Amino acid sequence: MKSVSIILCIILLLCNHLVDAQNDVGMSGQEVGNKVLNPAIPFLNLTPDARGGALGGSGAATDPDVNSLYWNNAKLVFIEQKIGGTLSYTPWLNKIANDMFISYVAGHLKIDDRQAVGVSMRYFNLGDFQINDKLGAYVADLSPYEMAFDATYSRKLSDQLSIGVTGRFISSNVSRQFELLEDIGVVYSMAVDLGVFYKKSMTLAGKNTDLSLGAHLSNFGPKINYGNNSSKDFIPTNLRIGVALKNYLDNYHSLTFVFDINKLMVPTPPVYEKDESGNLNIIDGKDPDRGLFAGTFGSFGDAPGGMKEELQELIFSGGLEYSYKNTAALRVGYFHENKNKGNRRYLTFGTGFKYRAFGFDVSYLVPVVENHPLAETLRLSLLFNVD
């Protein structure tokens, strides 16, 4: 039997902002705001597939496949096969709950050599909860979930450069007003992704090498409102920039290095101070209650700690992928988030196999931080391609 307090705890964990609260009150009455960025619908930025998961959550510039719909939609048109699809499954926070999971299904169609389209769906099941009142009496059952439906168009501008655009429909019945059941409803929103991808073949150290660069702006859309609350929350707009260097050791073996930088483009919480009436006033930083464009693009310069804190908001991920005949792969990666901004730091491992039109990928997560709820996260992906 799970109470409201447990639900709120799990919601906080699945946002992946797993740090001690930064809300210490000093002798002067100054209250330091939470340094963690906390947008609504955080599952939109959770890695859905096993290959990207095994590379530390990197994918802006990796070899194109159907999962490019998530990592960088501009890569889609560079897929060699005409038709492809994938199905991924991730048990989520399985050290805490056994009925939470993320499922992901996607498919693509190559119209011609210069155009491709794709569709995908993500579903985040947060499990089933029983709500009790303060006396422990049964109140209601709750089955929160979040979903996203995508449609993507990708086009080559040249033999080396492509762009992509995605339209996204978002649905969530996870309300922040758990104590007011009449306020629990389904929230809808829309968002767009924009991507660019560049790939160039060269010779490096006497070996054929592919250099790839990618940039992807995801989840750019209006703020959402939960329940009857008049305030609105930003969705997790994210800017991902990545590079990949694939070196062909010989006709059978290749080694790929990938590296991504992510910036969550939402307002940084300011620093508040209580006045004599007990009201909180901003003394450093900017008011987070801003418009879409001011809040999103102003996120590059609104941290109370200045440039030092802005740099702390950058998330770094990278990995190595060894491939044999493009049929078997070994992968390793690392994900790093500053301790003041969530403290997600973990190693990732994985492998992949292909046989004819089908492929299978698996990844495993090992946190650097002890007793981390993301420990032992396993991702599984099935893929198919038709020439």
Image (cartoon, rainbow, N blue to C red):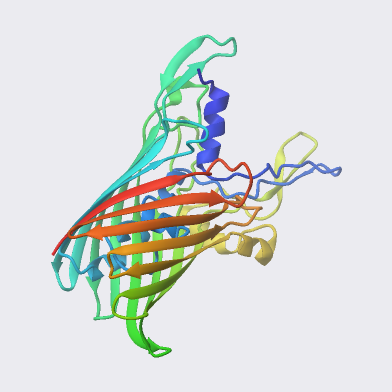
Residue 283 higher or lower than 205, as above or below: above
> Which residue is painted at 71% across and 42% down in the image?
23
Q: Nearer the viewer, residue 143 or 377?
A: 377
Left or right: 355 as drawn, with respect to 194: left
Rendered location of residue 231, percent (x, y): 51, 39
Residue at the spot 67% in from the left edge and 55% down from the top edge = 285
Front in this rendered view, residue 133 or 94: 94
Is residue 319 placed above or below 220 in the rendered structure? below
What is the x, y in percent for residue 233?
Answer: 49, 44
* Residue plotted at (37% across, 60% down): 71
In the displayed structure, would residue 324 be above or below residue 222? below
Q: Give the farthest residue toward the right.
A: 27
State left or right for residue 200 relative to residue 107: right
Is residue 58 shown to the viewer in this render? no
Return the residue nearer the eye: 383 or 174.
Answer: 383
Q: Work out which quarter of the rendered image holds the C terminus and state it.
A: bottom left
Going by the image, does 172 lie left or right of 283? left
* Viewer-proximal residue among 166 and 253: 253
* Residue 237 visible in the snapshot: yes
Residue 106: % across, % down? 25, 51
Residue 346 position in % (x across, y down): 55, 54
How many marks do you count on the picture?
Answer: 0
Place residue 147 in its image quadrant: top left
